[in-house]
Amino acid sequence: MFKNEEYRRELTDVINTLRSDYLTPERVSEKVNSYKSVTKPYLYSMPDVLYAPLTEAEFEQVADNIPKEIEENYQRYLESLERPMPFYIGVPEPQEGKLTVNWDAAYDFDSENITYTFELARDCLFKDILFSDSAIRIPQAELDMPGAGQYFIRVTAKNESGKTQTAFDYYYTDDGKVYGTKCFYVLEDGSIEEDTENEDS
């Protein structure tokens, strides 16, 4: 639906109306303060205070930042329209001693040409990169078949304006999600197994 310029324009019009008529910093601050006056006395009294996820100072900081976050999110939305759209990385395939990786083509609202950077690493933070290729014009990469083990793929799309976008794929760690990353395994027999334990159930 985002490929349709009319739909994008209508969505932006609605967002602008919400921002100017309903979600102004003054109005949001007024609502936050009214809700805060009701909830805070209970949150920081026994027994609720024993389970409060934030200190009282942190609570005040979060409440004060809510109006700012609305404006920040609005600016992120406008910026997202200048970036290529995200995409999915396919499951790698072994072919005659090579590893072939395909991914969906990213879409650019301004019809700018898109190139891709492909990276293969042993770790999800890409500190140990085994293979990298940039300025790829088709959504595919081919490299020598790696040995058995766990691997991570990262693909970044860039349009002619220099705006970048990563894939929808992500990998779970103890610290949260690492976005734009796909995990897979090369088994001892050379076959490929996609990491599915990281998918939402």
Image (cartoon, rainbow, N blue to C red):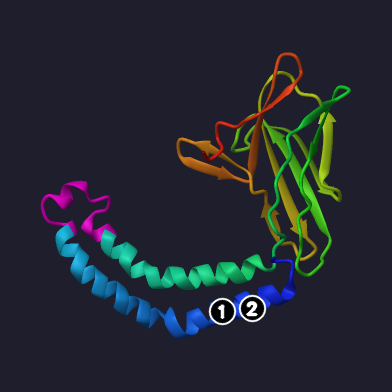
The magenta-colored residue range is 43-58
Give x and y (percent) for residue 138.
86, 48
> Compared with residue 111, is residue 45 higher up or lower down, i.e. above or below?
above
Is residue 13 rendered to the left or right of residue 26? right
Give x and y (percent) for residue 114.
81, 57
Where residue 25 sits, quadrant-wise, is bottom left
Where residue 95 sits, quadrant-wise, is top right
Q: Residue at x 69, y 63 (%)?
A: 83
Front residue of 146/11: it is 11
Q: Is residue 45 magenta-colored?
A: yes
The span from disc 2 to disc 1 (Cα, nearest Å) is: 6 Å
On residue 10, which mark appears? 2
Q: Quadrant of the N terminus?
A: bottom right
Is residue 103 rendered to the left or right of residue 38? right
Q: Residue furthest right?
A: 96
Q: Residue at x 45, y 35 (%)?
A: 174
Q: Are marks 2 and 1 in contact (CB under 8 Å)?
A: yes
Q: Residue furthest left?
A: 46
> Compared with residue 137, is residue 6 higher up or lower down, i.e. above or below?
below
> Compared with residue 10, is residue 162 higher up or lower down, i.e. above or below?
above
Where residue 153 sits, quadrant-wise, is top right
Front residue of 25/193: it is 193
User: Element at badge 2?
Assistant: helix
User: Element at badge 1?
Assistant: helix
- Type of the residue with mark 1: Val
Q: Is residue 171 magenta-colored?
A: no
Residue underneath mark 1: 14
- Type of the residue with mark 2: Glu
Q: Residue furthest top?
A: 188
Dot 1 surroundings within 10 Å: few (below 14), some, or many (20 or more)?
few
Give x and y (percent) for residue 199.
56, 38
Dot 2 surroundings within 10 Å: few (below 14), some, or many (20 or more)?
few
